[in-house]
Image: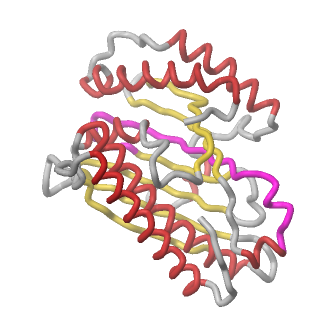
């Protein structure tokens, strides 16, 4: 059984800014769960696309009920591979990422396509899809719900993180008119609101009591 | 941002700076006049690939965008 997630968002920045910011989005205030980031392969292909592979390690916060059942999973962080293709001809950046450990517990695969917006050339479109599945007998439904809730929370952070990087680099986006201190305050408020929303998502998604997760 | 290899973070930062400049000023503008970051990338990779092996991170032989092949719309 697989949970499917789809979302489309407008980004108020040009595709060039988005593609540049994509490489510079870590660290950001919404990425505390991302521990390390490394480019492990990169090549410009003969047809002038840029292909890259990044290795990320992320924390593996589970809800309390899962921690009790799968204590061995706490020992290691999650390793995520993110493969990407920058296609200048079509002005698209396509990414595909998935975790390569803890796979028996949960597999999250995500495909994103960033492209120039159809309506406004100065804007971009981010299309995000995810497939979330668990192979654990007897728990897969609850784990998948948790996985989906955590993914939804993380993708909000990912969007905020990219917007943050864009506003830091290019002064694009809604935080431009604010002074630096005000901008940081606004970022903190947004992060708090996001984590509150995630907690609500968690209690809706899981009938068990889940206290904290990322 | 830190590298997974604790001793590789400086090399990573140097490479990232070079790449980000090249990406925005050359690649995105269609300028193919060579890659100024080759040496830095080589040094960084030597370090990080060693760390990956030491930590047993299973990225060896993983096909580029492998799981994407079986997904609809790929």
Given residues A183 and B26, the one toward you in this image is A183
Give whichever of B29, A26 is nearer the camera: A26
Measured as percent of width and height from the top left, residue A72 is found at 86, 61
Q: Residue drawn 69% across and 59% down?
A: A60
In the picture as drawn, the residue positioned furthest to the front comes out as A181
| Residue stretch rendered in magenta on the structure | A69-93
Pick the quarter of the image with the N terminus of chain B: top right
Per the image, is A88 magenta? yes
Residue A4 x %, y %? 52, 72
Q: Is residue A149 above or below residue A107?
A: below
Query: At x 54% / y 66%, what residue is drawn?
Result: A151
Q: Left or right: where does residue A193 sit relative to residue A145?
A: left
Q: In the rendered view, would you say A146 is above or below A208?
A: above
Q: How many numbered marks appear?
A: 0
Judge whether residue A211 is colored magenta. Answer: no
On the image, the x and y values in percent for residue A197 come to 46, 76
């Amino acid at each position: 059984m697989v949970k499917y997630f789809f979302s489309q968002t407008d980004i108020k920045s040009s595709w060039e800014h988005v593609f540049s910011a994509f490489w510079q989005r870590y660290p950001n205030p919404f990425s505390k769960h991302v521990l390390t980031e490394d480019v492990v392969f990169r090549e410009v292909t003969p047809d002038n696309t840029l292909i890259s592979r990044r290795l990320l390690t992320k924390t593996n916060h589970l809800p309390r009920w899962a921690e009790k059942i799968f204590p061995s999973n706490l020992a290691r962080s999650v390793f995520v591979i993110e493969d990407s293709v920058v296609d200048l001809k079509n002005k698209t950046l396509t990414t595909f990422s998935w975790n390569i450990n803890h796979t028996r517990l949960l597999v999250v695969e995500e495909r994103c396509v960033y492209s120039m917006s159809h309506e406004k050339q100065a804007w971009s479109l981010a299309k995000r899809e995810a497939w979330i599945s668990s192979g654990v007998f007897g728990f897969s439904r609850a784990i998948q719900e948790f996985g989906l809730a955590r993914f939804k929370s993380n993708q909000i952070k990912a969007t905020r993180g990219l917007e943050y990087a864009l506003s830091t680099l290019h002064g694009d986006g809604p935080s431009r008119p604010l002074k630096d201190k005000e901008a940081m305050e606004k970022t903190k408020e947004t992060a708090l609101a996001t984590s509150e929303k995630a907690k609500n998502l968690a209690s809706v998604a899981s009938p068990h009591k889940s206290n904290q997760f990322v | 941002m830190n590298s997974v290899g604790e001793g590789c973070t400086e090399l990573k930062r140097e490479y990232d700076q070079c790449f980000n400049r090249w990406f925005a000023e050359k690649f995105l503008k269609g300028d193919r006049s060579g890659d100024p970051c080759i040496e830095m990338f080589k040094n960084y990779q030597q370090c990080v690939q060693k760390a990956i092996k030491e930590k047993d991170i299973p990225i060896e032989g993983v096909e580029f965008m492998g799981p994407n092949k079986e997904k609809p719309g790929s």
